[in-house]
Each structure stands twice: as C-alpha cells, then as structure tokens.
Image (tube, helix red, strand yellow):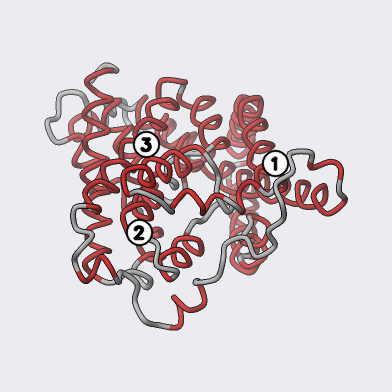
C-alpha cells in the first residue's frame, strides 16, 4: 500500500481536518488579526527553514516506491533468525517501506508464517525514522537528534527482535495474529502493484506517474501535519512560562525520561508534528534525553499506533510490543542524554 493509496483511503478524515483548520484560522483572523499574521509568518518561515532538507527525503521516499524497491523488501525476512532480525531492523530504520504505514505488510508476513522476531524488529524500528523523517528532524532539531533517532531505531529493532526470538517457541509467538475480519482484510501483500526493480523511474510512464503521485501525497501529508505543528510551537513559545516543564522533564529531574515516555508518548500524534513541538519543549526546559525518549516512544507507543496494532495482535504479543517499545525508548533517552548533555 503506497502513500497515495493511504491518502485516498483517508480522504474523508483529511477533509475534516482541513475544514477544522480553515475554520480555526478564520476565527483567529476575526478575533485577533495581528496575532494570526504573526502565526502565519512563523509557519511560513518554519516551512522555508526545513524545506532544503525535507525535499530530498520526500524525493527519495517517492523513488523507492516508484522504482519497485519497496515492493521487494519482504525477502529480507527469510533466513537465519539473527540475520533476518538485523536485516529487518536496518530496512525498517532506513527505508520508507510501503509509505507511511507498515501494518498491511506486517499482517501479511505474519499470516504467511514469517517468524514474529524479524517482524517485531521491523515493526519497532520502522515508525521512528526514514529518509523524509531524518531530514525533517535534522532541519528542525539538528543532526545530533536526527542521527541519534536513527541509531535509536536500529537499537530498538535489534532489542525487540532479539527478545522476541528468545520466546519463539511460545504458542502465542508462533501464532500472534488474531482471527478476525480486520486481519483478513490486512493480510494481502503490501505491493500488490509490484513491478520489477528499475531505478530509472523516468523511463516508463507508469513509474513516472507513480513517482509524481507519491511526491504529491507525501508532500501533502507533511504540509498537513507541519502547518498546525508550527502554529502550536508558536503558541507554546508565546504562552508557556520559561522553564515551565523543567521541574518535570528537565535536566534535574530523575524521572524526566520515564515521564516523557509514559506521558508524552501516548499523547504523540505524528512524527513530523512532534518535531517543532519538541523544539519548543526543549526551549522551555525539557532535557535532551527526555526529548529523545519522547520522539522515539511517540513513533511506536502513541495511542494512534497502539489502536492500529491492537485489533491485529493477540494480547501477549501486543503487550510484548508495548513493553519493548517503552523500555527501548527509555534506554534511548538515557543514552542520548548521557552522550548529549543530559
């Protein structure tokens, strides 16, 4: 399932979001036109600032889909456990497989009998980063956070895959999927429109059209989530008292990282939207370790991600997923904080 297909399926929800944003903007303009102009200027400047790094990531993500590379990565899940876990982790952390969601692919692989361990490794590492997310993180928070987040994704995948492999002989690990119509609907092959890999996407009209469609779909998605996120960052900076969060998730709080995971993670909405919000929280006193824990945990234990996974996995593998995600996020935060100014 490509980004464009996902966006088409989500059209009714997207239209409601656009309608809400437009209504809120009109109300703000009527209420305080000067303040609305300041917010608009901040949003535009934020977009201009991140564009040089986000655009290459968007183009790479679209190329991977149009070239057929993303439709053939499932082969890395077959082989020896250690090798497949490493391969699945690297692919999940570095490639935008099947656009912005891996749920159809994961359900299909599990239904086809692929072991839970490499699937868990991929499932934990893939939501955290990717080319577009890497470039957006670097543009918003700096390369330390971008590279740290990528390494955290790899570490979380290896941790999750390794721990799951130790439980491979349990009944629930050998048969982790629920038996329901949701799983049946998601069990198809991710790349049903798969084609042979060809990096020269410009040579065939179908590939060119798919590339353009993916670029537009990803760009629209990023604009949709970044616009309100930059506006929220402006409001946070305008209304939040200096060092207001320092007592809870600041450098001097021993509970900063766990709080960022257990409070911030579930409240997290979108990876792109979280970046400017995290920057605002850092400026308000959040520690770098807590910020990294928030970013990592949000991708894998947000309420939206959990709601998507719960109907697919049985309770025990679902709880294992959440436990590994929370533990790995805290470890990532503590390590990053220790290395980058706790």
Question: What is the number of the mark on residue 37?
Answer: none
Q: Name the residue rendered at 56%, 41% in the picture.
A: 226
Quarter holding the N terminus? bottom right
Quadrant of residue 182 within the rendered picture: bottom left
Secondary structure under tag 2 reads: helix
Residue placed most toward the observer, 263 or 131: 131
Q: Name the residue rendered at 22%, 33% in the picture.
A: 249
The residue to which callout 3 is attached is 154
- Residue 280 x, y percent position in the rendering: 41, 31
Q: Is residue 112 left or right of residue 191?
A: left
Q: Name the residue rendered at 54%, 32% in the picture.
A: 136
Which label's residue is closer to the chain start, 3 or 1?
1
Which label's residue is closer to the chain start, 2 or 1?
1
Mark closer to the observer (2, 3):
3
Secondary structure under tag 3 reads: helix
Q: Name the residue rendered at 26%, 32% in the picture.
A: 333
Residue 147 higher or lower than 88, as above or below: above
The residue to which callout 2 is attached is 303
Quadrant of residue 188 within the rendered picture: bottom right
Mark closer to the observer (2, 1):
1
- Marks 3 & 1, CB-CB < 8 Å contact: no
Secondary structure under tag 1 reads: helix
Which label's residue is closer to the chain start, 2 or 3?
3
Residue 263 higher or lower than 102, as above or below: above
The residue to which callout 1 is attached is 63
- Residue 74 x, y percent position in the rendering: 51, 54
């Amino acid at each position: 399932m490509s980004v464009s297909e996902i966006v088409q399926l989500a059209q009714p929800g997207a239209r409601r979001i656009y309608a809400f944003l437009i209504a809120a903007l009109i109300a703000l303009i009527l209420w305080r036109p000067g303040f609305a102009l300041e917010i608009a200027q901040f949003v535009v400047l934020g977009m201009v600032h991140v564009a040089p790094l986000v655009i290459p990531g968007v183009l790479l993500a679209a190329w991977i889909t149009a070239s057929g590379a993303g439709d053939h990565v499932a082969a890395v899940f077959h082989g020896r456990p250690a090798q497949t876990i490493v391969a699945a982790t690297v692919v999940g952390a570095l490639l935008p497989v099947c656009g912005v969601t891996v749920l159809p692919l994961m359900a299909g692989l599990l239904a086809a009998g692929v072991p839970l361990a490499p699937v868990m490794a991929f499932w934990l590492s893939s939501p955290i980063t990717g080319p577009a997310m890497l470039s957006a993180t670097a543009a918003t928070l700096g390369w330390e956070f971008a590279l740290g987040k990528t390494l955290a994704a790899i570490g979380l995948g290896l941790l999750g895959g390794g721990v799951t492999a130790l439980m491979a002989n349990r009944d629930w690990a050998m048969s982790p999927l629920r038996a329901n119509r949701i799983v049946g609907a998601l069990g198809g092959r991710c790349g049903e429109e798969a084609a042979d890999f060809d990096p020269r996407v410009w040579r065939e009209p179908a590939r060119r059209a798919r590339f353009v469609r993916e670029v537009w779909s990803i760009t629209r998605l990023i604009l949709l989530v970044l616009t309100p996120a930059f506006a929220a960052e402006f409001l946070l900076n305008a209304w939040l008292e200096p060092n207001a969060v320092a007592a809870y998730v600041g450098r001097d709080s021993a509970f900063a990282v766990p709080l960022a995971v257990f409070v911030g993670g579930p409240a997290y909405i979108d990876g792109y939207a979280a970046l400017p919000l995290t920057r605002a929280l850092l400026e308000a006193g959040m520690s770098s370790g807590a910020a990294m824990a928030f970013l990592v945990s949000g991708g894998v234990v947000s309420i939206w991600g959990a709601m998507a996974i719960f109907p697919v996995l049985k309770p025990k593998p679902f709880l294992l997923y959440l436990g590994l995600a929370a533990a790995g996020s805290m470890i990532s935060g503590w390590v990053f904080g220790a290395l980058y100014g706790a």
